[in-house]
Image (cartoon, helix red, strand yellow):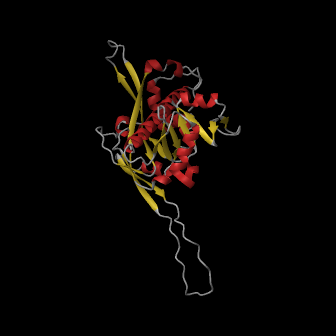
Amino acid sequence: MAFTSNDVLTLADFAKLPTSTVWGAIDEAYNAGTNPFRAAGVLASSPLVQRSLTDGEGIRTEVQAWNDIEYVESNISNDDPEDHATPLKMDSKIWDAVRMHRNVGISGMNLVQDFTAQDPVAALGTRVANYRNTDEVTALFAVLHGLEKADATAKKFTFDMDADFDIKQVLKAVQDAKGDNAGIITTLGMSSTNYLALQLANLVTKAPTDAVTSFGRIADRNIVVDDRFGNKVYGLGAGLFNYGSAPQSKRSVAVEFDESAGKGSGQETIWFRWKQIIHPMGFDYAGTFAAKGGPSFAELNNASAYTLATDEKKIPLVVIQPAA
């Protein structure tokens, strides 16, 4: 359904729109690549995770992954029909995950500009999509920092530098952590301060011009800049986090009327409700949560939230701590 500036659209009208129309506009903007972790492949859309969102409304769930085929020497063929070979199996692994049910409400008084736009549905959809992208990255950092806290003693993913921030030590830590599998670290996450140090040293190159998103690069790895990384440098790889997201099955878009607000002038609020999973592959969710709708970000940012469930060498994560 298209609207022009000649149409009068109110929140009451929004409540009458098909849910698919509203969420279609949101998802179009949401999937436009505004999230650098998705653009870098660190946060990867997963059909298996997406499918688990439709399996009821529970909080704890499972996501499936396929293990690599374990290598054994190939067979020597012969002409004996009674000499049978044993086929290799590609085993699946089930990870325990957690589903989050989230929502956001927007006051009608904040939407005047959106409703006077050429396409108010798209304008409002973009606003909600931007919020969801920010919320998604915040959730990712909560999980990432929780994984780091859990590794504080085991030191399977965390490495200390001998001195201040030094890109040579960063690359050496990646090599020491992953060995001949170091290529799985495709992205380096760092603060703007550390990124500036690389720029001042003329070490940063740019991604190819035909890339969808332009990243600074070093040692053939993309650089994602976010001050929530702090002074540490995070080596991240494709598919470290898998995600799925979908509108709630019931009342994913709803309008609330509070007639008594404003001393009787009334207040309208539009609510958007969705469910999502952001799961670190190779880990099981083992945490607890107080709310019925799933864990808060503070509960995800906890050493007991996730437990390692596979060989750490296969997980594309390295956390490098400068000495100062």
Q: Is residue 77 left or right of residue 43?
A: right
Q: Tell me: residue 47, above or below residue 14.
A: below
Viewer-nearest residue: 296 or 83: 83
- Residue 246, image x, y percentages: 46, 42
Q: Tell me: residue 48, above or below residue 188.
A: below
Instruction: Tally the numbered discs.
Output: 0
- Residue 272, image x, y percentages: 43, 32
Q: Is the N terminus in the top left, top right, bottom left or bottom right quadrant? A: top right
Viewer-nearest residue: 315 or 242: 315
Residue 237 makes an appearance in the image: no
Specify the farthest residue to the right. 209
- Residue 16, image x, y percentages: 45, 31
Q: Is residue 202 left or right of residue 162?
A: right
Specify the farthest residue to the left. 290
Q: Is residue 258 left or right of residue 169?
A: left
The residue shown at (61%, 32%) is 198
- Residue 249, image x, y percentages: 41, 42
Residue 78: quarter of image: bottom right
Residue 295: quarter of image: top left
Q: Tell me: residue 244, above or below residue 130.
A: below
Residue 95 makes an appearance in the image: yes
The residue shown at (50%, 18%) is 112
Q: Tell me: residue 137, above or below residue 283.
A: above
